[in-house]
Amino acid sequence: MELRYGTQIITPATDETVLQALTRQGVALRSSCRGGVCQTCVMRCLEGEIPGRAQSGLSTDLISQRYFMPCVCKPSGDMVLAPPLADDFFVPAQLEQRLDDERGIMFMFEPMRTLPTSILAVIVRDSWGHKARFSLATRPDVDFYFGIHLPAYDVSELAEQWRQSLQVGMQIDMREALPSEDIAQLPASDRPKDPPPDPELWEALGEGALMTPILEDFYTRVYADPQLMSFFSGVTRQRLVEKQYSFLHQAITGNKVYFGNRPRNTHHWMVISDALMDHREQLMLDCMRAHGLAEKWVERWRLIEEYYRPDIVKSAPVPRRVDGVDLPLEGFEELVIDVGSICDGCGSVLEPGETVRYHVRRGTIYCSRCNTRVPANPQASSPDESL
Ligand code: HEM
Ligand code: FES
């Protein structure tokens, strides 16, 4: 069985997904949940059979254009693969409301075909041929419309045209902004990194005694939750309970007891929408209530966690930042290992001194026995190149 991607030919191992096989061979692909939920990894199959599960949740348009999710695709035969074409994702949207005031104009659009309501930013293409990126000014999952705000100070050609001519009832094309078109949503630099401590909440939690059973219950539910579980593969539940306990202990009391990563760095690669964050929050609230925590304290705990939303919610991975320096986000490096290890591709035992291919974000290593066919050339295979 063979997978073709550009000039690369890859033989998938038994039980390997397309994403695993391509990653093992040094193809730099975008991915996040690796469980068929977030659609970050979506790509095209030009030839060959696509197993049904690999298209589950995709729009009928994308299915008809042979898009699929390689992270949940175990190939059943040869496949010819290609990166996504951004403009396949445009849908027509109708202007339903136009609200003008002194700060600018709010345009409320309704897409005429399905557009994911969890998205944070869109690319628009109007009938005058302008194309531009906007962060959404509304939350389509809550208030239904895809709202775009055109500030009064914007004097671009698109802005002038829209101000004069874009009226209710007219149509534009709209699509989700892809990660390569994204401006990372980072918290304002003048914002304190933690919320104000809440010693009364800590006391209400029995100096933390009530927190452990709540967190144990919470992570049991998270690990069984179809929308959340795939983010957590490879991490033990107990480790998370302990980390989360000391993180919250520090956030609630202000005492320096947490020695893990900050939320922005921990979640840097996770594509987490507001809707997914809300869903996680609901699980957390259910657990607090199930353990008898009074509503007043449930809300105070919720506010502590809510403070970190801008660090966590984003529509594309952001690089880890250490001492103000951004670390590489994607791609591979050749590495000589100085201690023995196990290959993440084929499970072979690796001796100190061996050269391996190293995935910089996930930290996985692949030995020369399972990636010999084509030398690594992440530039040539980046999915962004077609955009
Ligand atoms: C949908 C929302 C969220 C998802 C999918 C998520 C997912 C994850 C995952 C997969 C890890 C394990 C990372 C690893 O060890 O490699 C993790 C760790 C962690 N998360 Fe979240 N998380 C979410 C929201 C939050 C929120 C709201 C907070 C804070 C209130 C938080 C705080 C932490 C902390 C403190 C760790 C441990 C960091 C460390 O190991 O150094 N997470 N999260
Ligand atoms: S759907 Fe494939 S990485 Fe999330």
Image (cartoon, grey):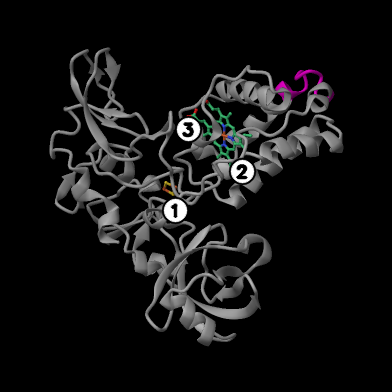
Kind of residue sitting beneath label 3: Ser
Q: Please give left or right for residue 345 compared with residue 370 in the image.
A: right
| Residue depth check, mark 2 versus mark 3: number of the one nearer the observer | 2
Q: Which residue is mark 3?
A: 233
Main SS, magenta residues: loop
Please provide the residue range marked out in magenta.
204-213
What separation in Å lies between label 3 and label 1 (alpha carbons)? Answer: 28 Å
Quadrant in the picture for residue 201: top right
Q: Which residue is mark 2?
A: 309
Among numbered discs 2 and 1, the one appearing first in the sequence:
1
Kind of residue sitting beneath label 2: Arg
Check the image and report above or below for 214 versus 75: above
Query: Dot 3, crowdedness within 10 Å: few (<14), some or many (≥20)?
Result: few
Q: Dot 3: what SS?
A: loop
Mark 2: C-beta under 8 Å from nearest atom of ligand 1 = yes
Name the residue rendered at 59%, 41% in the picture.
Answer: 190
The number of numbered badges drawn on the structure is 3
Among numbered discs 2 and 3, the one appearing first in the sequence:
3
Q: Which residue is mark 1?
A: 183
Name the residue rendered at 83%, 31% in the picture.
Answer: 293
